[in-house]
Amino acid sequence: MKEMIYQTVCPGCNIGCGLYIRENEEGALTVDFMKSSSANLGKLCRFGMKLPHHYSKATSMVDGKEADIDAAVKAASDKLKGTRNVTMLAVGATTNEEHLGFTKIADALGTVVNTGIGAYEEIPSECHPSISQGIPLDDIENAGRIALFIDPYVQYPLLVRRLLAAKKNGATIVSLTCCDLNLADENVSINPADYKTELGLDSNSIIITDVNPHSDAEQVKNLLNLALVTGSKIMFMKPFVNSTGVHLLGKSAGQIGLHDIMDGINDGSIKTLVTLNSDLLELMPNTADAAETLEKLDDLVVITSIDGPVNEMATIVIATEPLYAKAGSFMNVEGQVLNNSGESTVGIDAMSTLSQNLGGEAFDFQAMHSKMMESVVRKFTAPKYSELECKVMETAAPAENSGNLISVYNPFMWCNQTDDNDFVIVNMNMVDKLGLQKGGMISLTSDAGSVNMRYTVRDIPDGLILTMKKLPVVTGNTTEVKAEAV
Amino acid sequence: MANVGDMVVGYATDENVRSRGASGGLVTAVLAAALEKGLVENVVVMKHINEFEAVPIITDNVEEVLASTGSLHSVPVNLAKYAVGRKVAMPAKPCDVQAVIEQGKREMIDLDNTYIVGLNCGGSMHPITTKKMLVEMYDIDPEDVIGEEIEKGKLIFKTKNGEEKAIAIDELEEAGFGRRESCRFCTLKIPVNADLACGNWGVIGDMAGNATFCQVMNEKGAKLLENAIEAGRIEVQPASDKAIAIRDKVNSVMEDLGSYLEKEIFPEIPDEERMQYYMDQMENCIDCGACKEVCPVCACGEDSKCTMFHSLVDNYKMSMYHLVRFMHLSDSCIACGQCSDVCPSDIPITLLQSRFSIPSQRRRNYQPGMNLDTPPFFEVMLK
Amino acid sequence: MMTDKEWTPKIVAFCCNWCSYGGADTAGMGRFQQPASTRVIRVMCSGRIDPLHVFNAFLEGADAVLVTGCHIGDCHYVNGNEKTEVRYQFLEEMLQQLGLEPDRLHLNWISASEGERFANFIKDVTAKVKELGPSPLKPAGVK
Ligand SMILES: Cc1cc2nc3c(=O)[nH]c(=O)nc-3n(C[C@H](O)[C@H](O)[C@H](O)COP(=O)(O)OP(=O)(O)OC[C@H]3O[C@@H](n4cnc5c(N)ncnc54)[C@H](O)[C@@H]3O)c2cc1C
Ligand code: SF4
Ligand code: FES
């Protein structure tokens, strides 16, 4: 009858929604609402409501066989000892403390931890703090004008109520996304070169966009410039629960993005990869391509709390406790430090042993926690917008949308978790043009293959097809596909 | 000897429980005694995390029950869902009781095995609203709050350094704070549907603030009270006529206020505008399903009509999910407000549902969750 | 006869197998003229008609929905239609509160031999709904 109740944070994005996970005697999980959580008032989106499906427990493995965690750590130590040129990846899907522990392993191996967002490399480091930490969520409600470059309904649903509140308080909302947004007062399509003159932003405005491993650096720079020249504030949403924490804690120098990592593996310069709660099969747009690339690695060491698809391919899997049970903290997009109530340190302890075996430091949870508090909390105790400290940058035009099939990144897509989203979105003109039948399917064909999908009709620009689910025909943010009626 | 209909004023014999209790710790003592003496196997209580946060837990540990004293006005949960499938005693606000009884009607719980200690309720508040209110209206740092109380229409907060500050609830509500919307138009303030109905209304004289007025509503209630007296956990004395009169008076004032606010909260919408009104209200629904998950009267389980016949691929003008729910809950909605509380798009879903359920229930002179004599309304009429 | 240009409402009629479906059939076979606006959906008993089916018809673009069955006392499953009646009350109230015009939803008991009654019923409803115009719940793209 003993039920465990964990206070934790939703891993769906970095808004930092507080919630309870209840675990009954049989290990069955349910979500419960933590109404005193200021980021979300206990409210959750579709993804949050389905969290019990997300926390599938990982199993430690060595060379494809189940092992206990000590054996896996030992095997990883043996594998990595003396190996040069180890590449490490942690996108920010676990606690600050585990991330710092992982960094210690990187120190021991003489390398850095990559957080996977390539756009960072190309942007002056003075801008990084402003990209990493956004605006207090409450402040959105008091903005005068808000320019949206993301679809809040699909991508960051807990922003919806903030935007609606802003509207109630008199804000005007301009959407620059490809879909007409219900809550926007103006849905516009403007050439990036004209943002400055056409959008009417000023110091009472907020630009809301996002940065993720597949973001185009030029677009990021463009929007930073827009903020700089108009005096508008800018908020970069991010897809992982601790995206903010890892960027503020990590060394930004010498980092490479996911795409560089994949290129490195393909050209043979990366032979050994160690990941922390970062499943490249889920993170890369095309799973089959990613699998082909990862096959080329000599060694793939996966440290994770989740039973993800990449675990099957790993040389070694070090399975840590589920995210909700961990001792540790996260930092949300506002810069608030949010603590788990869990007390388990299995992951940190395993990383400490690994670090020690590799000739590095031993550490414990407390040490990592103090380190986090020192380096982060001192700077950002009360969330507050930090003014941009960079200068206007030279930019090239953002990459043109080269394809007609657009991936709308959302928590389900990042985790490749199933949802009631196995359909694409088209407009009425496409239905007429292709002669799509009600209840019928649309077939999509790209270089990567072909797939038949159900479809639904919304008001989107002509010629476009949107997907909220990861499709096997997808090769990037946009993909050129041939569409036909089935 | 306790009898049905008795009205007593009482308190916990344990000094510690009495002083920490909301008003004399009687409720806590009754629950603890029920567990101790084997009347039940478990008790549902609120486990405090801080002044603004508590989690309902099910416990078989008397210490845990004793530690759960105090009324948390800013923890708006409905406890019914936590009682399912057990031989249990629980504290319950009137809407909690209604939900428990509705679950009983749907055979999710065995009411014979569920002992309900009702709490009078003048309303609850949302924790985040409360924190904002503390800063803006009380000039108190929420972290410093150690206790709260409602007395004579005023909401009182006590701080670490021993200070107290009281502001009239009317004033707070005028400033946009105060009780949740569903509590404002609620008219069931004394849980006459529970086994015991407990509260501080009618506790007068030197007892005020440290005793509870308790009415025995039925045989189970008599058993609960007697059990606690026998266990030596409480002391009671008959309520005076004056006390009874005062309790009735306050109750009727509160009921009238609820009816008055109902008119204000539900302005008439002309026939030809209603469809657009509902469409506008629901246009930001993101289909998270939280409103169903949290609904304390719903007993359908995961795969139910409202979810199984609803799909994101449909581009209907209204959501099948909501249409099914509006209809399906029209005989059982108790307007507890849980769905509005959890809606990520801040849709006032309780208010929308109430526009369907209140008239439907009134027309049939039926109030859900009052007793087992009237099963779910559909069912009565279908027999 | 109607011209092509004139708008014809789409009416979904739920009919029970034993009575009203027969009524619809008789209406069709007989010489009773009725507008070609009706889609008949046959169910075994009116008691099978769930409010959900009615919502679905409206959401898919019906301009009116008819719930029909045997006369009270004649239901082939003892009291299926009495249950229909109860359910219908809730449904009617609900759709009215929702703001749907009352003329778009009807309940009628029709026996297998009442072809004319069925035809007249359809004619009436069609005329009323024509006045109202297309249903506000009709999805974009549905005619
Ligand atoms: C939200 C709220 C509003 C109230 N308003 C009134 C009122 O207007 N007039 C009146 O006469 N009495 C009201 N009461 C009841 C009153 O505050 C006392 O609870 C009652 O007099 C019993 O006192 P006690 O010392 O015996 O309770 P205690 O021994 O302190 O026991 C309190 C019990 O209530 C439970 N509890 C605490 N918070 C909640 C909650 N939010 N929901 C459900 N259970 C909870 C605890 O777990 C505990 O079991 C209210 C209670 C609550 C919770
Ligand atoms: S809680 Fe709100 S967003 Fe979620 S399904 Fe209900 S109404 Fe829609
Ligand atoms: S069989 Fe016709 S209504 Fe039941």
Image (spheres, rainbow, N blue to C red):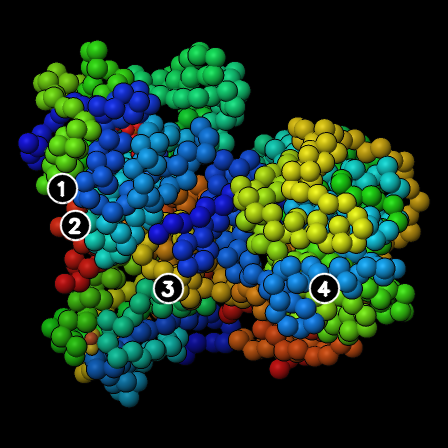
Left or right of A360? Residue C112 is left
- Identified by mark 4, the residue type is Ala
Nearer the camera: disc 3 or disc 4: 4
Instruction: Specify which label sits upstream in the sequence, 3 or 2.
Output: 2
Q: Are marks 4 and 2 in contact (CB under 8 Å)?
A: no
- Label 3: how many Cα within 10 Å (few below 14, some 14–19, many 20+): some
- Label 4: how many Cα within 10 Å (few below 14, some 14–19, many 20+): many
Q: CA distance from mark 1 to mark 3?
A: 36 Å
Query: A217 above or below B63?
Result: below
Q: Are marks 1 and 2 in contact (CB under 8 Å)?
A: yes
Q: Which residue is mark 2?
A: B112
Q: CA distance from mark 1 to mark 4?
A: 63 Å
Most extreme residue toward the bottom is: C29
Query: B163 above or below A484?
Result: above
Point out which mark residue A485 bears: none
The location of residue B261, given as percent across then percent down, is: 33, 30
Instruction: Specify which label sits upstream in the sequence, 1 or 2.
Output: 2
